[in-house]
Each structure stands twice: as C-alpha cells, then as structure tokens.
Amino acid sequence: MSSEIVAGTANILHQHSEYEKLQQDYSTPTANELTARNLARHGVDVMPDEVSSWHKINAAAVQAKLDIHAERAQAESFAQDAAVNMIASARSYSPAQNSGVEDTPLEEDNENDDESNSEDDSELLTIDELYGYDDPEDNAEAALDDVLKAQERE
C-alpha cells in the first residue's frame, strides 16, 4: 500500500500511472483484475473488462484525445442553433402551405387576427419559452437532448 494518500483529480492521474505500471510489469488482465478487486473492497462493483474501458478513456485523455469541454460547447451551440431554427420554422409554418389546400380566409373572422398575428410574428420565442421549465438550465438541457437525439437519427 502506498504511504502517500492522494485524493481528488490528482488521484485519477496517480491511479492511471499505477495501473500502467501493473500492466507493464505483469499483464493487462492482471492489471484489470487487481484494479477491480481493489474497487470491490471500497464498495464499487466493477468487472475487469470495465476497468479496461476506464483505462482506455484515461489513456486517450493523457494523449490529448479527449476534450469533453469542447464537445459540450459544440453540442450546446448546436442546441442553440436548433432551437432558433425550430422557432423560425414554427413561426413560418402555415397549414395551408403544407397541406396543398388553398387558404380561403373568411373576412369576418380574420379582420382582427391580422393585427394580432403581425405583433406575435415580431416576437421570437426564447428557449425558456419554448420548453417551459422554470429553471433555465432545464430548458437548455432539454434543447441539448433534442439536438443529440436528432444527431443520432442522422
């Protein structure tokens, strides 16, 4: 057991280094098994193949092949763009245009509507108004979820 106790983010680097030493001195299966066993002693139920995945992610981070912050910024930017596009699309949507049926307005019903519609069209909905959650962070997360789901479908 190490005489030095490391905690927090520094512990991630320390454990990564210790895992690599085990891997080099013995083998990957041995490093995976011993790491899983140590985690189990601390109440963390992990299979040896999951340890291998953990190491793969850490190795990518060490080699600067992982940038979660940049990925988040890009996804949030896509979410913002998607929300703006959805709002613009919803505002320009006309059932008559999309159904192929010609719109025949009834003059008595539409006289007062023209004025109120032009006022509504000038106001763009915000993400908070579009999603309707009380917490703006919840609205942003919902928009991001929608973007990620749309990207999965592509």
Image: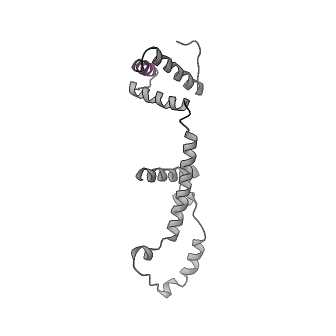
> Residue 120: percent from the left, percent from the top?
58, 72
Q: Quadrant of residue 88?
A: bottom right
Q: Can residue 135 be seen in this view?
A: no
> Residue 91: percent from the left, percent from the top?
52, 69
User: Can you say whether 133 is above or below 120 in the image?
Assistant: above
Residue that appears at 50% across and 67% down? 90
> Residue 32: percent from the left, percent from the top?
42, 22
Image coloring type: one colour
- Of residues 23 and 75, the one nearer the viewer is 23
Q: Is the magenta stretch mostly helix, strand or loop?
A: helix
User: Can you say whether 112 is above or below 120 in the image?
Assistant: below
Q: Is residue 113 visible?
A: yes
Could you tell whether 10 is left or right of 144 in the image? Answer: right
> Residue 131: percent from the left, percent from the top?
52, 57
Q: How many numbered marks appear?
A: 0
User: Can you say whether 141 is above or below 98 in the image?
Assistant: above
Could you tell whether 78 is left or right of 27 in the image? Answer: right
**Region of the chain picked out in magenta, as a range:** 30-43
Q: Quadrant of residue 31?
A: top left
**Residue 92 within the magenta-colored segment of the rendering:** no
**Residue 35 within the magenta-colored segment of the rendering:** yes
- Of residues 28 and 73, the one nearer the viewer is 28
User: Can you say whether 89 is above or below 24 in the image?
Assistant: below
Residue that appears at 60% across and 74% down? 119
Residue lying farthest bottom?
Answer: 107
